[in-house]
Image (cartoon, rainbow, N blue to C red):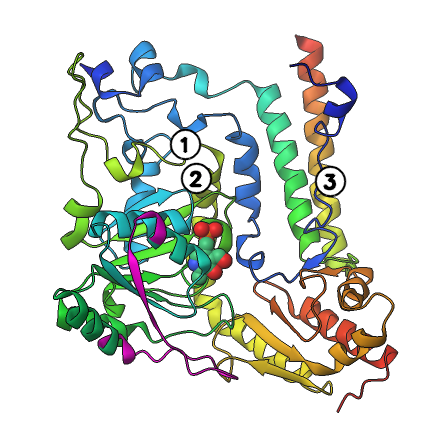
């Protein structure tokens, strides 16, 4: 079927409305994925199709074996950087979790996850036909995961099924409150029971220093577009030697007529994964990532400063663990909610007031509470965000202490 | 045999590790370097969003980059004329 020419016009010159050059975007998912200069350049150089496959080695035709551009070296360096033995770049963190669940379990098995896990962790389990048990958090206002309760959940599964869960997963930093969990506690529990431990570092690896071995992780999952200054889709699956055979199992299938076999392909990856520009952005940003994780403390300091300033506004209260250990923040804002009740734009007033001041990323419609992330903002930008909130508070006669 | 393994088509046809064409001509490299320099300017401006208030040092830095770009564009023009 022919598509009318006029209809196609809108695809020709697509522009992002909230470009990083013109707006301060404080959406929790956006800050860690802002490209470095090197990655922006790489996008142009490697934008065409299968751009990284020009020198795919014929004897080992696999993404992780390519040396021009230096993908093989990158995988080695990335594994080292995370304190793990092997790495594969996949399309998303959720795919890494899915692969881990799939390769470690059989349908109907149990996996244990924390109750602050991202929805995609649940879906990954569902697609693998697994059952889940959630480890509870302590509720309002901290929502802190009770890490010791992993033991109770393991025992529950043992009692119910007569066997151990296939894996336990902890979200290192959750997307709801930005709570940082002490992964070592769960790592130790996993080791005691000899259960594979998946540490989901979507919001930590790439931003702060991570050493999988020190934390007791058997698998680390990460998100390039969330935390590694890379374009979507990019995810990281890092594993330790003990699970290599299971997770990176090679293909065994053969054609009944052709007898074709693909013995060097890794089944769970369906051969190759990210064969172009997104992978290259991840690689191009890597040197800066190695540098930036060392400056994590400064990033947290900026967040703590902004939180303490915003809490001067009547009715503002930071939720989650205090003081902040991560740049993703959940703020309760009762006073703005009260404004919204009588405002002609209702809950949208806050979003619109901020957008007028060139700040975006607060979910439209929310005023009672909202989330933001300050990662990578300069001090000047942090103070500008504070001033914008103060300005809005003053406009609606809300007190600033 | 390699074909049975899948992938690696280009390398099989052209020979692995042989790439004399990789080091492109001056005109192309100047075009790409100009784009890179403009990207450098964008990255600086990103840190100054939303109003791009620049101090004297920042202005100087941006102007230096722009001068580099002008030189490159002149080289590109020369190369095009030579073609
Ligand atoms: C904790 C956590 N894990 C995983 C994801 C999904 O990441 P990806 O888009 O790379 O699959 C998110 C996204 O917000 C997340 O917050």
- Answer whether residue A150 is magenta in the image: yes
Residue sitting at x 23%, y 67%? A216
Q: Is mark 1 within 8 Å of ligand 1?
A: no
Residue A275's tag is 1
Residue A340 horizontal/vertical position (percent): 79, 74
Identify the chain of the residue marked 3, using the numbered disc in the image. B
Secondary structure beneath dot 1 equals: loop
Q: Are marks 2 and 1 in contact (CB under 8 Å)?
A: yes
Residue A158 horizontal/vertical position (percent): 16, 70
Main SS, magenta residues: loop
Please identify the quadrant where the C terminus of chain A is shown. bottom right
Magenta segment boundaries in residue numbering: A126-151
Residue B66's tag is 3
Residue B72's tag is none
Residue B25 horizontal/vertical position (percent): 55, 18
Residue A279 horizontal/vertical position (percent): 43, 39
Tag 2: Cα neighbours inside 10 Å, few (<14), some, or many (≥20)? many
Corner quadrant of residue A275: top left
Q: Residue furthest front?
A: A160
- Horizontal side of A125 relative to A187 (left or right) equals right
- Callout in the foreground (1, 3): 1
Q: Residue furthest bottom?
A: A401
Residue sitting at x 26%, y 77%? A185
Identify the chain of the residue marked 2, using the numbered disc in the image. A
Residue A279's tag is 2
């Amino acid at each position: 079927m022919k598509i009318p020419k006029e209809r196609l016009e809108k695809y020709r010159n697509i522009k992002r409305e909230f470009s990083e050059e013109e707006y301060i975007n404080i959406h929790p998912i956006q800050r860690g994925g802002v490209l470095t200069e090197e990655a922006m350049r790489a996008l142009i150089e490697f934008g065409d199709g299968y751009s990284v496959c020009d020198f795919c080695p014929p004897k080992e035709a696999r993404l992780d074996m390519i040396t021009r551009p230096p993908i093989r070296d990158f995988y080695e360096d990335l594994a080292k950087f995370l304190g793990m033995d092997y790495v594969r770049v996949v399309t998303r963190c959720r795919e890494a979790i899915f692969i881990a669940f799939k390769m470690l379990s059989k349908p109907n098995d149990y996996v244990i996850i924390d109750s602050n896990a991202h929805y995609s962790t649940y879906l990954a389990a569902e697609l693998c036909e697994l059952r889940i048990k959630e480890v509870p958090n302590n509720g309002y206002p901290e929502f802190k995961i009770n890490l010791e309760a992993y033991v109770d959940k393991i025992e529950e599964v043992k009692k119910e099924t007569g066997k151990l869960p296939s894996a336990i997963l902890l979200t290192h930093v959750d997307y709801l409150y930005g709570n940082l969990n002490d992964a070592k506690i769960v790592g130790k529990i996993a080791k005691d029971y000899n259960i594979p431990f998946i540490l989901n570092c979507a919001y930590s690896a790439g931003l702060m220093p991570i050493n999988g071995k020190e934390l007791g992780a058997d698998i680390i999952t990460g998100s390039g577009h969330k935390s590694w200054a890379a374009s979507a889709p990019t995810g990281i699956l890092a594993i330790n030697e003990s699970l290599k055979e299971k997770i990176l199992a090679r293909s065994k299938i053969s054609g009944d007529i052709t007898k074709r076999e693909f013995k060097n392909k890794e089944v769970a990856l369906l051969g190759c994964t990210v064969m172009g520009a997104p992978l290259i952005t991840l690689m191009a940003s890597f040197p800066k990532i190695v540098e930036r994780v060392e400056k994590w403390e400064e990033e947290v300091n900026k967040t703590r400063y902004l939180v303490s300033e915003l809490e001067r506004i009547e009715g503002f209260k930071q939720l989650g663990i205090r003081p902040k250990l991560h740049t993703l923040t959940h703020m309760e804002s009762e006073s703005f909610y009260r404004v919204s009740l009588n405002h002609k734009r209702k809950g949208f007033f806050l979003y619109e007031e901020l957008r007028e001041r060139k700040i975006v990323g607060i979910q439209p419609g929310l005023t009672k509470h909202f989330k933001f992330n300050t990662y990578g903002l300069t001090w000047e930008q942090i103070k500008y965000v504070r001033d914008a909130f103060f300005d809005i508070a003053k406009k609606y006669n809300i007190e600033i202490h | 045999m390699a074909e049975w393994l899948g992938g690696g088509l280009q390398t099989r046809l052209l020979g692995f590790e042989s790439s004399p064409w990789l080091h492109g001509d001056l005109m192309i490299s100047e075009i790409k370097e100009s784009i890179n320099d403009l990207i450098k300017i964008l990255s600086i401006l990103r840190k100054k969003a939303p109003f791009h208030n620049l101090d004297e040092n920042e202005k100087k830095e941006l102007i230096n980059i722009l001068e580099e770009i002008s030189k490159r564009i002149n080289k590109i023009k020369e190369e095009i004329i030579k073609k």
